């Protein structure tokens, strides 16, 4: 299950970057397709994350990692929506990167 989770978020990050580049270059149809595939991977990430969450000890700190993981997805969507609307996304990029780094750090340091 861990392999599915890690593979899902790695693919999601790649799809996110592709979606950002397509959206910035005004390739609307391909950007929409990639965004929809990205949202499918959000479901894989959340589903496998929930399964992993129920395998661990409730006092181990995984609830914080789960919250950070959801925030990573939220900021990915905020970045894409901001770019699509032509708004400044600098703060969303900074928060996304910081929360992503914290989530990955917690994921590799927690016991499972």
Image (cartoon, helix red, strand yellow):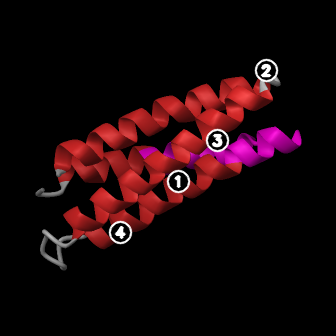
Task: Identify which residue, 28 or 65, lies in the foreground.
Answer: 28
Give the distance between the C-alpha atoms of the residues marked 1 and 2, in whole angstroms: 22 Å
Which residue matches tag 1?
73
Q: Would you say the magenta stretch is mainly helix, strand or loop? A: helix
Q: N-terminal of the two: label 4 or label 2?
A: 2
Please tell me which residue is depicted at 46% across the width and 52% down the height of the picture: 42
Residue 53 horizontal side relative to residue 84, left or right: left
Please tell me which residue is depicted at 28% across the width and 57% down the height of the picture: 48
Residue 63 against residue 106 in the figure, above or below: below
Which residue matches tag 4?
64
Give the distance between the C-alpha atoms of the residues marked 3 and 1, in whole angstroms: 12 Å
Give the distance between the C-alpha atoms of the residues marked 2 and 3, in whole angstroms: 18 Å
Residue 88, percent from left and from top? 83, 41
Residue 81 forms part of the magenta stretch? yes
Bin the neighbour count of mark 4 within 10 Å (Cα to Cα): few under 14, some 14-19, many 20 and up. Answer: few
Of tags 4 and 2, the one toward the viewer is: 2
Residue 3 forms part of the magenta stretch? no
Query: In the structure shown, which secondary structural element does the residue marked by tag 2 occupy?
Result: loop
Of tags 2 and 3, the one toward the viewer is: 2
Q: N-terminal of the two: label 2 or label 3?
A: 2
Residue 64 horizontal side relative to residue 89, left or right: left
Which residue matches tag 3?
93
Give the distance between the C-alpha atoms of the residues marked 4 and 2, in whole angstroms: 36 Å
Residue 82 against residue 17 in the figure, above or below: below
Residue 6, percent from left and from top? 28, 42
């Amino acid at each position: 299950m861990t392999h599915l989770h890690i593979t899902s978020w790695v693919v999601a990050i790649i799809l996110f970057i592709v979606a950002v580049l397509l959206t910035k270059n005004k390739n609307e149809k391909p950007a929409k397709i990639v965004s929809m595939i990205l949202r499918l991977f959000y479901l894989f990430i959340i589903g496998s994350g929930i399964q992993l969450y129920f395998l661990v000890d409730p006092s181990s700190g995984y609830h914080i990692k789960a919250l950070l993981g959801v925030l990573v997805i939220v900021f990915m969507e905020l970045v894409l929506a901001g770019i699509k609307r032509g708004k400044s996304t600098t703060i969303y990029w900074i928060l996304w990167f910081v929360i992503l780094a914290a989530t990955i750090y917690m994921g590799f340091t927690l016991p499972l």
